[in-house]
Image (cartoon, rainbow, N blue to C red):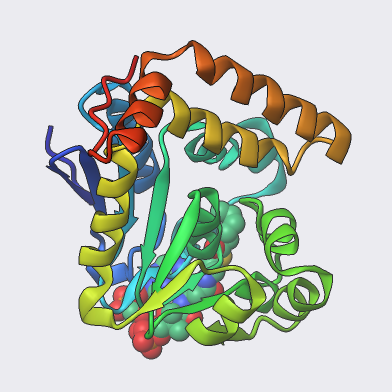
Amino acid sequence: MTYETIKVETRGGVGLVTLDRPKALNALNSTLMAELLEALQAFDRDAKIGAVVITGSAKAFAAGADIKEMQALDFVDAYMRDFIGGWNDVSTVRKPMIAAVAGYALGGGCELAMMCDFIIAADTARFGQPEITLGTIPGMGGTQRLTRAVGKAKAMDLCLTGRMMDAEEAERAGLVARIVPANELIETAIKAAETIAGFSQPSVRMAKESVDRAFELTLAEGILFERRLFHSLFATEDQKEGMTAFSEKRKAQFKNR
Ligand code: HXC
């Protein structure tokens, strides 16, 4: 499959999507988001893929939704066709997704990174929700996911002033899982994704599902949900293999069963 605005490759059990609209700093337009969703859903269906990395260029992960595409939109158009409503489907991908962010991750770019399961940032990364400077607000989950990630004070600061934060501030605030030198970004993200892809896939899916539930449930309900999934994994061959391999001091050979 060839795409116009993204590049798609596989590295072993890892799917890699590179956003590729360099002239627009990877601004997210309808074509790019449709192609990205198609590629992610294809990886989700592909049994050989265990995890996905989404990245951009050295200058920009993505500088936001495409302002030129949005400029002429009016309320009735936006409302009637539920503009960008479908873009949230990125967050319904069941396999783990890592955002490997270098340069700008602004507006929809920051929001896309936050739809991934975690963010690995290059030391050049800059995050922000500058929609306020355009007379609008985040529309792809920025006010919600950013607030859950960094808390009210910083989320308000970023959404109301439109300022950017650098990689260090983003890591301190809890938005970013790790920072690496820019020239090690892709390699580090792929290595993390390979590690994930090498584990028993039922347990990987359940770990992701369970962490995600933490944002939806009360603590008591979340702990119950986690324990039920934990119990269910004792029904897998891979749990027997994992624990036997530990006892026998050898590497586990998981079969995803
Ligand atoms: C369309 C964009 C763009 C965007 C950059 N470009 N960001 N085009 N939409 N979001 C284009 C520029 O118009 C320019 O094209 C080219 O990319 C290079 O950008 P420059 O501005 O010349 O680069 P630079 O001076 O290095 O500045 C980089 C920048 C700046 C600070 C990232 O481009 C910028 O502020 N971009 C907009 C960031 C933003 O406001 N994002 C939020 C968008 S709203 P030409 O043709 O002139 O060379 C949003 C809503 C999300 O995301 C919620 C709903 C989906």
Find ligand 1 in the image and state its quadrant: bottom left
Image label count: 0
Q: Quadrant of residue 44?
A: top left
The quadrant of the image that shows the N terminus is top left
Which residue is at 75% across, 77% downward? 154
Is 95 drawn above or below residue 215 in the view shown? Answer: above
Task: Provide residue 211's location: percent of width, then percent of height.
Answer: 63, 41
Is 100 drawn above or below residue 194 in the view shown? Answer: below
Which residue is at 37% across, 85% downward? 124
Q: Left or right: where does residue 216 sit relative to residue 84?
A: right
Q: Left or right: where does residue 183 sit relative to residue 234?
A: left
Who is closer to the viewer here, 250 or 209?
250
Which residue is at 87% across, 34% downward? 220
Q: Is residue 101 visible?
A: yes
Is 34 drawn above or below residue 206 in the view shown? Answer: below
Q: Left or right: where does residue 155 sit relative to residue 168?
A: right
Which residue is at 74% across, 43% downward? 215
Who is closer to the viewer here, 83 or 55?
55
Task: Provide residue 26's location: percent of width, then percent of height.
Answer: 33, 64
Task: Provide residue 94's location: percent of width, then percent of height.
Answer: 46, 30
The quadrant of the image that shows the C terminus is top left
Who is closer to the viewer here, 189 or 221?
221
Q: Residue furthest top?
A: 235
Q: Is residue 94 visible?
A: no
Is 181 drawn above or below residue 81 in the view shown? Answer: below
Task: Provide residue 50's location: percent of width, then percent of height.
Answer: 30, 34
